Image (cartoon, rainbow, N blue to C red):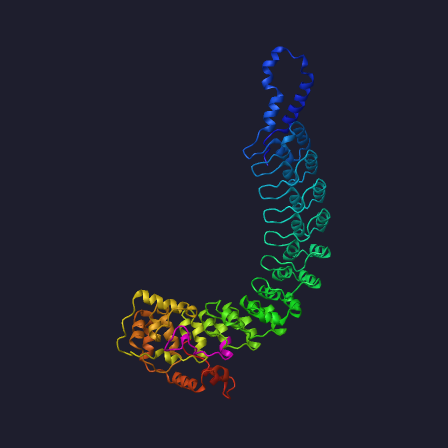
């Protein structure tokens, strides 16, 4: 900080002024004309002068630890003791903030008010605690500083001492009369601060002094909720040992177990499961397992399943309505979070694939996640499931794979009905005119987010019509080419032919349908038809040579 005034000049002026007041009786009459410019008047002008920030020499002296200057200024002008800067800082607050103990003592002895706070509402006592200066705290308390005064956020000095895990400061404050459970603006007590920040020493001290272990914030959150959220295992264990209630819901309806699962603190989950009422969990709007799945907390989900959580617990219809896709099961939550590992854990634990209004397979396909799609198909998901909000003449899952041929291939390998994609009521005849551009964009939007569509029911859409929308048109060639590997001889309708003719690089795909299909390919497709939808699952169990199994399990074009 740049010094705004020269203390040596002030001290010199003050000393000279005092000397002249004692020895000025022998002055000549002619000196009277110069009295208007004596050091005494100059002292008055300079010592009272303020900077553009409202600082006086006293503020500067206190901030820089110039104790002698502080004493001299206060002796000459005691009324300056509580003068504030434009930021409402007193000399005492500046001295405390800069940790100049001797200046603080001089100001207090001169009558400085220890409770005047700055613009941010920080009192000198709060600042002393923030600096962890125990001598300063003791000095301020001895001069009557109010220990329960709050800053702008409603924190008291005790909140600050606890956040620093400084039990010596806590002890001084409590002995001076500090309240043990003072709530801040959001009803957060020092104990909850200790739980939030993992201040184990301060937490133990407060509990030993009788702090309320189950006191709630304005959101109904307890110290145990906070320890569970922030992953402070030792804090949670201490709170439980001191009778913290693990069955208190916060205002959002969550128990500490929910919170620990949501944030993935599996060790705290293990601590809370034995002391949490299963009836309370069931009465909650969502289960801890749902939250672990939603936030991809694999270890937490594993602990919950190992300790008896119901893998097929579902949300009520009312609670399911919170979500646009009306999701209900933990498995759907896991698929929605993109976590194949968590989804696999749930499936292995016996998760049903049919508990949700929308199949988890459709969601996985729309996310372009072949691993999750394969997992669900390997465990019995129907590859030919339709989209509830969008009726199609072909199995709708293919319409969700526009950006992922790997996902579409996974569906096809598991028995997706590719033949249905080539069935068209118009055949080689001209198709009806395409809808207006705004209608086409509406259809594209339906397929870009079909699981969340809540508009009026759409008319049944054919594959060729869907492929003509902006959602499928750009990938039409590769999509048709892949589908051809899973069907025998087919004839393209006029719309599909038009699509393939639109780009030169897609002409070979069209030619593939005009030429006889290889016998090797036709035989493989015929055998697939006989094996049924789940042919991949049964393929390895067939008593066939490896070469033949390889032939049946592969496609020539991909």
- What x and y, as percent, mark residue 347? 55, 76
- What x and y, as percent, mark residue 44? 61, 25
Compared across the picture, whether 289 is left or right of 422 comes to right
Compared across the picture, whether 101 is left or right of 386 comes to right
Compared across the picture, whether 132 is left or right of 431 comes to right
- What x and y, as percent, mark residue 100? 68, 38
Read off the magenta span.
Answer: 375-396
Judging depth in this view, the residue of 553 and 275 nearest the camera is: 275
Judging depth in this view, the residue of 65 and 75 nearest the camera is: 75
Residue at 50% x, 82% y is 537
Magenta span contains residue 393:
yes
Residue at 60% x, 60% y is 221
What is the quadrant of residue 201 in the picture?
Answer: bottom right
Q: Is residue 235 among the parts visible in the rendering?
A: yes
Q: Quadrant of the N terminus?
A: top right
Looking at this view, name the residue that lies furthest to the bottom.
Answer: 543
Looking at this view, name the residue that lies furthest to the top.
Answer: 29
User: Mostly what secondary structure, the magenta segment?
Assistant: loop
Whether 151 is drawn above or below 46: the answer is below
- What x and y, as percent, mark residue 289? 57, 70
């Amino acid at each position: 900080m740049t010094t705004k005034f020269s203390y040596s000049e002030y001290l010199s002026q003050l000393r000279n002024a005092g000397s002249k007041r004692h020895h000025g009786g022998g002055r000549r009459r002619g000196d009277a004309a110069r009295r208007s410019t004596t050091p005494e008047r100059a002292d008055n002008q300079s010592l009272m002068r303020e900077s553009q920030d409202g600082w006086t020499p006293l503020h500067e002296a206190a901030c820089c630890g110039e104790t002698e200057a502080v004493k001299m200024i206060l002796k000459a002008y005691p009324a300056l003791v509580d003068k504030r800067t434009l930021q409402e800082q007193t000399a005492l607050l500046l001295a405390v903030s800069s940790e100049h103990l001797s200046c603080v003592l001089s100001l207090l002895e001169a009558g400085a008010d220890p409770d005047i706070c700055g613009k941010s509402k920080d009192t000198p006592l709060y600042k002393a605690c923030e600096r962890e200066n125990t001598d300063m705290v003791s000095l301020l308390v001895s001069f009557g500083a109010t220990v329960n005064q709050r800053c702008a956020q409603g924190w008291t000095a005790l909140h600050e001492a606890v956040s620093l895990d400084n039990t010596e400061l806590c002890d001084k404050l409590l002995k001076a009369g500090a309240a043990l459970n003072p709530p801040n603006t959001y009803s957060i007590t020092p104990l909850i601060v200790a739980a939030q920040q993992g201040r184990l020493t301060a937490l133990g001290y407060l509990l030993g002094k009788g702090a309320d272990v189950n006191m709630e914030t304005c959101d109904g959150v307890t110290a145990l909720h906070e320890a569970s959220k922030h992953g402070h295992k030792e804090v949670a264990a201490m709170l439980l040992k001191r009778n913290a209630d693990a069955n208190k819901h916060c205002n959002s309806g969550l128990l500490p177990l929910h919170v620990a699962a949501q944030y993935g603190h599996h060790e705290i989950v293990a601590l809370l499961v034995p002391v949490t009422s299963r009836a309370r969990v069931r009465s909650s709007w969502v289960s801890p397992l749902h939250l672990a799945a939603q936030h991809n907390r694999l270890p937490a989900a594993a602990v919950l399943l190992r300790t008896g959580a119901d893998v097929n617990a579902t949300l009520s219809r009312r609670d399911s309505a919170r979500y646009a896709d009306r999701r209900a099961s933990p498995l759907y939550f896991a698929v929605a979070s993109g976590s194949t590992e968590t989804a696999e854990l749930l499936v292995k634990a016996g998760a049903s694939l049919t508990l949700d209004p929308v199949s988890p397979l459709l969601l996985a396909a729309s996310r372009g996640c072949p691993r999750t799609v394969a997992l669900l198909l390997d465990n019995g998901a129907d590859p030919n499931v339709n989209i509830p909000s969008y009726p199609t003449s072909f199995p709708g899952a293919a319409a969700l794979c526009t950006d992922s041929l790997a996902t579409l291939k996974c569906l096809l390998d598991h028995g997706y009905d590719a033949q249905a994609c080539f069935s068209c009521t118009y055949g080689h005849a001209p198709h009806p005119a395409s809808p207006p551009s705004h209608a086409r964009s509406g259809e594209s939007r339906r397929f870009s987010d079909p699981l969340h569509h809540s508009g009026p029911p759409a008319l049944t859409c054919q594959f060729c019509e869907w492929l003509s929308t902006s959602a499928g048109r750009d990938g039409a060639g590769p999509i048709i080419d892949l589908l051809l590997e899973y069907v025998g001889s087919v004839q393209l309708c006029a719309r599909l032919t038009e699509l393939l003719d639109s780009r030169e690089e897609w002409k070979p795909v069209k030619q593939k349908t005009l030429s006889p299909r290889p016998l090797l390919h036709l035989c493989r497709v015929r055998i697939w038809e006989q094996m049924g939808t789940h042919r991949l699952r049964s393929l390895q169990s067939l008593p066939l040579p490896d070469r033949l199994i390889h032939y049946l399990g592969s496609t020539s074009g991909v």
